[in-house]
Image: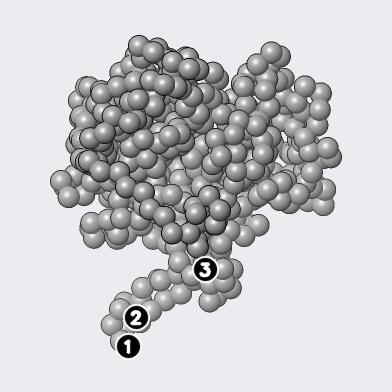
């Protein structure tokens, strides 16, 4: 019946008995505390059925620096991560690409935030922490050291979130090691004060003269480990390997290219399936010490209430939205981002002549015309599998704070159907270039080539990676 009727009108059920679940905690191989640019390594439990979607990094975090640094954690604890690499038996499987935090930020700008509001630190704190209720005054720092103040990174880009099937028998592969490299201190805003933007030279958007640093402590990695009383899965693996020679596990691999862009930036990609290209434009000063950046449209200084009725001297500035006074498009609130992750269109040569964008791949142009930023935005929307912007992004906000572009070279929803349909550039590497016109200044250009790679697992835990 299930094969004749659709599932919503069919009567059928499957049962798998003898399933058990548990959760393991893995400590880093070195210390369970770390600072900027340090490397953390975790070995996943061998001979276990591990649910890769359940892997999460737990830690306490603080932008502590000195007592007067005004340090703030960025909006999203995952932004403290610069690189994530996956090794199996010493073989690099997931590429240890640069700028993991910016890559996830760029994707979230279009696909919506995947940062949990309870344990992910989704917003920058100004004066009152929503995480533990603590207050920050003057040029104090944001710091969480209590055992009940831990943060969690529960969503990962790359292999951990994309490998199919997501539940993998680690007894069939060599020892799996997750290597995480932490980001530099510049990812944390260094704020001169706690007041709203526009109140003078010592508000949250102004830079403090003292550089803030950050520290992670009480670090651990947790994951769900499953058990099955039946040996059906083992038998299927053995039969597949004996008949084909290997089992195929597709996953997303990413390669990074960074340059100072002045009109043309060249790079090359060698992959069996090049699926997408993500292009991030940032000011060349992105890593310079800076305060928090207020996203246009959201609240700034300018609206007051009385702390005590009738006492004008006790006025409190609660802020007024930058667009309409009432806050159109859900902007009647505060919104700050780290200047390190601010993606912004460079200044234009002419206010009346728009900039143009185009990609060259082995002599072919993508798109087939020089597109302005609005046309590229629509191409970008068409290039992502899902589009959900939680903050109702406006064009003004997109150009000022979230200026990322994406081009798709594969069929839509390919990853969900385990279909490698992107550009095959293995025989002759794709010589590509991002070409722009109309900029009056250089910018930092970070390009991410998103590819579908294949992990092949053979007999005796032998593995090979088809990039």
Position of the C terminus, as image quadrant, is top right
Q: Residue furthest left?
A: 147
Q: CA separation, marks 2 and 3?
A: 25 Å
Task: Select label 1 or label 3 by which is in front.
Answer: 3
Residue wearing tag 1:
310
Question: Does residue 351 lie above or below 167 as drawn?
Answer: below
Identified at 66% across, 35% down, the residue is 410
Question: Does residue 241 lie above or below 138 as drawn?
Answer: above
Residue wearing tag 3:
330
- Mark 2 packing: few (<14 Cα in 10 Å), some, or many (20+)? few
Residue wearing tag 2:
306
| In the foreground, 157 or 33 | 157
Q: Is residue 321 visible?
A: no
Is disc 2 placed on a helix, strand or loop? Answer: strand
Identified at 35% across, 25% down, the residue is 235
Q: Which mark is residue 223?
A: none
């Amino acid at each position: 019946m299930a094969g004749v009727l659709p599932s919503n009108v069919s009567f059928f059920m499957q049962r798998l008995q003898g399933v058990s679940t548990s959760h393991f905690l893995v400590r880093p191989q070195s210390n369970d505390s770390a600072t900027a640019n340090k490397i953390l390594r975790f070995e996943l439990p061998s001979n276990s059925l591990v649910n890769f979607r359940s892997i999460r990094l737990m830690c306490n975090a603080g932008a502590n620096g000195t007592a007067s640094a005004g340090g703030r954690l960025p909006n999203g604890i995952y932004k403290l991560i610069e690189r994530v690499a996956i090794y199996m038996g010493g073989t690099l499987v997931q590429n240890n690409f640069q700028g993991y935090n910016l890559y996830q930020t760029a994707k979230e700008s279009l696909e919506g935030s995947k940062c949990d509001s309870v344990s992910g630190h989704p917003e920058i704190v100004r004066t009152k922490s929503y995480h533990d209720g603590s207050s920050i005054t003057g040029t104090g720092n944001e710091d969480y050291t209590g055992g009940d103040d831990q943060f969690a990174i529960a969503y990962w880009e790359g292999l951990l979130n994309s490998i199919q099937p997501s539940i993998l028998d680690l007894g069939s592969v060599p020892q799996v090691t997750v290597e995480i490299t932490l980001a530099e201190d510049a990812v944390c805003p260094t704020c001169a004060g706690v007041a709203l933007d526009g109140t003078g030279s010592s508000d949250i958007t102004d830079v403090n003269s003292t550089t803030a640093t950050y520290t992670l402590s009480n670090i651990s990695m947790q994951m769900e480990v499953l058990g099955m009383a039946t040996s059906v899965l083992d038998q299927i693996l053995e039969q597949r390997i004996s008949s084909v020679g290997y089992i195929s596990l597709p996953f997303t691999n990413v390669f990074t290219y960074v340059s100072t862009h002045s009109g043309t930036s060249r790079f090359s990609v060698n992959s069996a399936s090049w699926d997408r290209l993500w292009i991030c434009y940032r000011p060349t000063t992105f890593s310079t010490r800076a305060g928090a950046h207020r996203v246009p449209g959201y609240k700034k200084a300018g609206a007051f209430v009385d702390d005590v009725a009738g006492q004008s001297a006790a006025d409190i500035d609660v802020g007024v939205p930058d667009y309409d006074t009432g806050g159109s498009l859900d902007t009647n609130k505060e919104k700050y981002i780290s200047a390190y992750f601010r993606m912004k269109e460079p200044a234009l040569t002419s206010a009346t002549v728009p900039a143009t964008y185009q990609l060259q791949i082995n002599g072919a142009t993508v798109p087939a015309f020089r597109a302005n930023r609005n046309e590229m935005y629509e191409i970008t929307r068409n290039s992502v599998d899902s589009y959900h912007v939680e903050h109702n992004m406006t064009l003004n906000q997109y150009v000022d704070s979230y200026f990322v572009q994406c081009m798709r070279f594969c069929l839509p929803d390919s990853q969900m159907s385990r279909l490698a349909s992107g550009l095959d550039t293995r025989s002759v590497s794709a010589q590509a270039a991002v070409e722009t016109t109309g900029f009056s200044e250089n910018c930092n250009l970070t390009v991410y080539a998103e590819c579908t790679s294949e992990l092949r697992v053979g007999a005796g835990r032998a593995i090979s990676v088809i990039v």
